[in-house]
Image (cartoon, coloured by chain):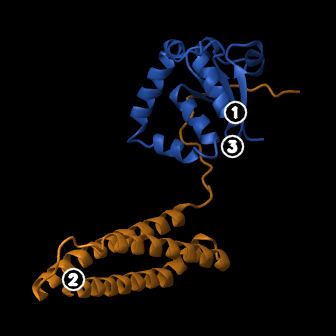
Amino acid sequence: MTTTYTYLIYLTISVALTIWVARTLHKNGRVFLVDVFHGNEALADSVNHLLVVGFYLINFGYVSLALKLGYLVTSAQEGIEALSVKVGMVLIVLGGMHFFNLFVFSRMRRRKPIHDHRPPIAPDAFTAVKQEA
Amino acid sequence: MLSLTVLYDPDCGLCRRAHEWVAEQPKLIALNFVPCASDEARKRFPLLDHDLTKQDLTVIRYDGAVYFGPKAWLMVLWALARYRDWAYRLSTPELLPTTKRVVSAISQNRYQISRVIGTS
């Protein structure tokens, strides 16, 4: 019975954490995306939403896969230890995903059209060019 | 009209392959390919040392600026929409010596490389 409770507590904490991080990302990522898409808010909202969906899928997928303990929990101490390992892993995965999202945002921000028209390097010499008639 | 004239070696398989690849890339600047030391090249650039252009790739800008060897390769990269960033990156003071060494090594051994990859 204790094992089942441990699972339920694990699920509650993981799901709550995932939702909290996803909402934070959704709320604060929007400003970035609006800038990336040059003020096109509809496109920014759409991309933002798609990113959050991917975020949920990966995290819930991980939470679900990592659920099984493999042994029976017999005391409250064991339950808390099991929870600490499982929730700790979820937190690290969430952190990794969060930084990956930030990386994607910053990459998108950097991708601006080419403004630079300077040649990369100085010529070796100059020669006369005969214009075609 | 901004454009670059590329004097390439028509006898080298690797160069022909590179030419085909460049021809397919989206460009920011027009590239005209002219075989090096050909009549057309001599007619268009009467004062250029055409024997030198046989040794390595040469690029001539619309205003007559001449880029030779590794610099010519960088100018070709610079003309391509997808690789302009790379032209700047490879020509930074930190990377330029390596770029020059690698490109020169490829250029000097282009006939051997062409033979190995079977395009001679």
Q: Is residue B51 above or below residue B58?
A: above
Amino acid marked by disc 2: Thr
Q: Amino acid at mark 3?
A: Pro
- At horizontal 60% and vertical 79% (from top left) the residue drawn is A45
Q: How many marks on residues?
A: 3
To the question of a shared chain for discs 1 and 3, the answer is: yes
Residue B29 appearing in the image? yes
The chain coloured orange in the image:
A
Left or right: residue B26 versus residue B92 is right
To which residue does mark 2 refer? A3
- Residue A9 circle label: none
Image position, residue B110 (x, y; %) = 52, 17
Q: Secondary structure at mark 3?
A: loop
Residue type highlighted by circle 1: Ala
- Drawn side of residue A36 relative to residue A57, left or right: right
Please give the label number shown on residue B26: 3
**Distance CA(mark 2)–CA(mark 3):** 61 Å
Q: Which residue is mark 1?
A: B23
- Image quadrant holding the C terminus of chain A, namely top right
- Quadrant housing residue A16: bottom left
Chain in blue (letter): B
Q: Nearer the viewer, residue B103 or A83?
A: A83
Q: Position of residue A89 (x, y in %)?
A: 26, 72
Q: What residue occupies the far right of the structure in this picture?
A: A133
Q: In the displayed structure, would residue A30 be above or below residue B99?
A: below
Q: Chain of mark 1?
A: B
